Amino acid sequence: MMDSPVTRESSLASLRDKREWDLLIIGGGASGLGAAVDAAARGYRTLLVEARDFASGTSSCSTKLIHGGVRYLRQGDFALVRNALRERSHLLSNAAHLVHPLAFVIPAWRSLDRIVYGAGLKLYDLLSGGHALAASSSLSRQAVIDALPGLRRTGLCGGIRYWDGQFDDARLAITLMRTASELGAACLNYLPAVRLLKAGGRTVGALLRDTESGEEFEIAARVVINATGVHADSVRQLDEPGTAPLLTPSQGIHLVVDADFLPGQQALLIPETEDGRVMFAIPWQGKLLLGTTDTPRPELQQLDDPQPLAEEIDFLLRTAAGVLSRPPTRGDIRSAFAGLRPLIHPDNTDEKNTAALSREHAVLVSASGLITVAGGKWTTYRLMAEQVVDRAAEVGGLPSEPCTTRLLKLHGCPSKPGSDVYGTDAPLLATLPGHDRPLHPALPYTEAMVRFALRHEAARTIEDVLARRTRALFHDAAAAEASIGRVAEILAEELKPAPERLAAMIAAAHAAARRFRPEA
C-alpha cells in the first residue's frame, strides 16, 4: 500500500457531502479499527469516529501479548485458545514489524509442577496445530537460571519454556487506522457521536460533534456499529434509554520498572498468584513490564483514564518479590497504568438477540438495528471484525462481499520480519527534521517521531504523541513529562494551534504524566 496521507480537514470535508455511508463505526479501539479495516477491504463506504484519540482507552493498556491464553487451558476453553493461536499466526505475518515471537519461562519450585506445566503446554502446542512458533520444552534448573537472570533460585528445580507473541498495542491501533484509511475509510478522532438518528424505529445514523471546532455533522448510514468498549452501554442507552447494562468493568494494571530486575530477552510467567490469576514479567522496549490484576470496578462512574489502586500496586510488587532475587519497590516504578476490561456479564445477554461468538466477545443487534460488539481481546480483533462486519452486512442490506483480512498486510508491514516498528515507513521517518535528535536521554524516541506522528498518524495533542504514537508515558513517565515542552514546540510548528489551545494541551499532558506516576 502506498502512503497517501489523508488530512483531518479532507476527512471532515467528506462528512459535509451528505451522502449515505454503508457503515458508521463508533469507537476507535481494537474492535472498531479492526471492523473499519475489514469493511473498507470489502469495498463498503466506511466511516469510523472516536470520541477521544484512537486506542486512548483499554486498547493501549494491555499486557502487550498476542497469545492463545495459557490460563484458558485450565478453564477448558479449547476453542477460544485454538482460534486465538490461529489469529496469532495471521498477525505475525500481516504485522511483522509490530508482532514478534517471545519465549516465556515458567519456573517450577516443585517437581510435580514441572510435570503439570509441561503437560499443559504440550496441549497448547497441539492446539496450535500448524501455527506453532516452536515446541515447548522442559528446562533444567541451570537452564532456567540462564534464561532468567534475576530469578529467585532458592528451591528452584527447573521449568518449562514455551513461545507466544509480543506486540505494541497502540502502534498496532494506529497501523489499523492507517490501513483502513488507505483502503478508503474515513477515520476521525476527537469526533464523538452525541446522538443517534432514528427513522421509522430504525437507527439510521448519528449526530457527530468535532471537539476542536464545535462543528456538528448529521451522518446517514445503512448500519451503525457500537464498538466503544467499556462505553458500549452508554451508546446502547442512546439507542434504547433504560436498557439493561451488558458490561461489568474489571480493572487490570501494569507496572514498568528497569530491565535489570530481570535481565535478558525471555519473559517470566507465574502460573498462579494469590488471587488465582497469572502474572507476567516481560521485557518490553528496554524495560520490564509487570502485570496484571483483575479488580472489579462496578462503582466506576468515570470510565476514562482509570488509575491503579494502591492495593493493586502492592499486589504486583508483592508477587514480584516472591520470585525475583532483587524485588522492585514503589520507588523503582517508572510508569504505572490501568485499563478497564469490557467484560460481558453472563446474566445480561439475551439469547434471542445475541450471537455469542465466544466466551469472550459477543455481537448484539437491538430492535432498531444498532449493532454492538462487546468484550474480546487484541489477539482475536481480526476474527471479531470479520464476524461483526458479516452481521452488519446482513442488517444493513449490503451486498455480500467476502472477508479478505486473513492475508491482508497491514500498513508498513515489511517483506521480512523486522524490529523497526515503523516498518516500510522508516526511510520516510529518516528524512524528517530531528531524526538524529533524541527527545530525551532516557527515552528511545526522536524529535522526528513527533513530527511523523503529527503529519502522518493523526496525532492532535501532546498526550497523543507521548502516550500512543510514541510510548514515552508508558516507558518512563518522568522523562516523558520532561519532554512536554519540546513536544509542544514541535506541535506548535506543525499544527499551529491557538495559544490557549496549546496551553490547555500542555496542562493536560502534565496531568496525564501524573496519572502514570504513583506516589512512592
Image (tube, rainbow, N blue to C red):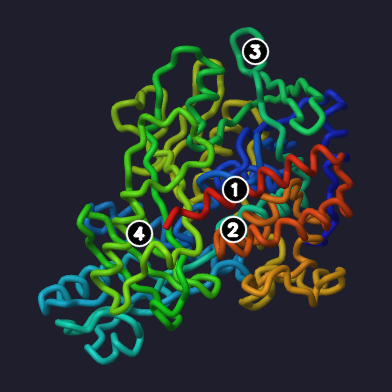
Mark 4 — residue?
Answer: 69
* Mark 4 to mark 3 CA distance (whole Å): 41 Å
Provide the secondary structure element on which disc 1 rests: helix
* Mark 2 to mark 3 CA distance (whole Å): 41 Å
Mark 4 or mark 2: whose residue is earlier in sequence = 4
Mark 1 — residue?
Answer: 512
- Residues at marks 1 and 3 touching, judged by CB atoms closer than 8 Å: no
Q: Does 315 sit above or below residue 8?
A: below
Residue 370 in the image, given as x and y percentages of width and height:
56, 23
Residue type, label 1: Ala
Q: Nearer the viewer, residue 482 or 14?
A: 482
Picture quarter with the N terminus: bottom right
Q: Name the front one of labels 4 and 2.
A: 2
Answer with the quarter of the image where residue 13 lies. Answer: top right
* Mark 4 to mark 2 CA distance (whole Å): 27 Å
Residue type, label 3: Lys
Residue 431 in the image, given as x and y percentages of width and height:
87, 72
Residue drawn at (59%, 58%) of the image = 473
Provide the secondary structure element on which disc 2 rests: helix
Q: Name the front one of labels 2 and 3.
A: 2
Mark 2 — residue?
Answer: 473
* Mark 1 to mark 3 CA distance (whole Å): 37 Å
* Mark 4 to mark 1 CA distance (whole Å): 31 Å
In the visual, does 281 lie left or right of 337?
left
Mark 1 or mark 3: whose residue is earlier in sequence = 3
Query: Taking the image as drawn, is residue 139 in sight?
Result: yes
Q: Does 469 sit above or below residue 181?
A: below
Mark 3 — residue?
Answer: 198
Residue drawn at (73%, 53%) of the image = 178
Q: Nearer the viewer, residue 428 or 300?
A: 300
Residue type, label 4: Gly
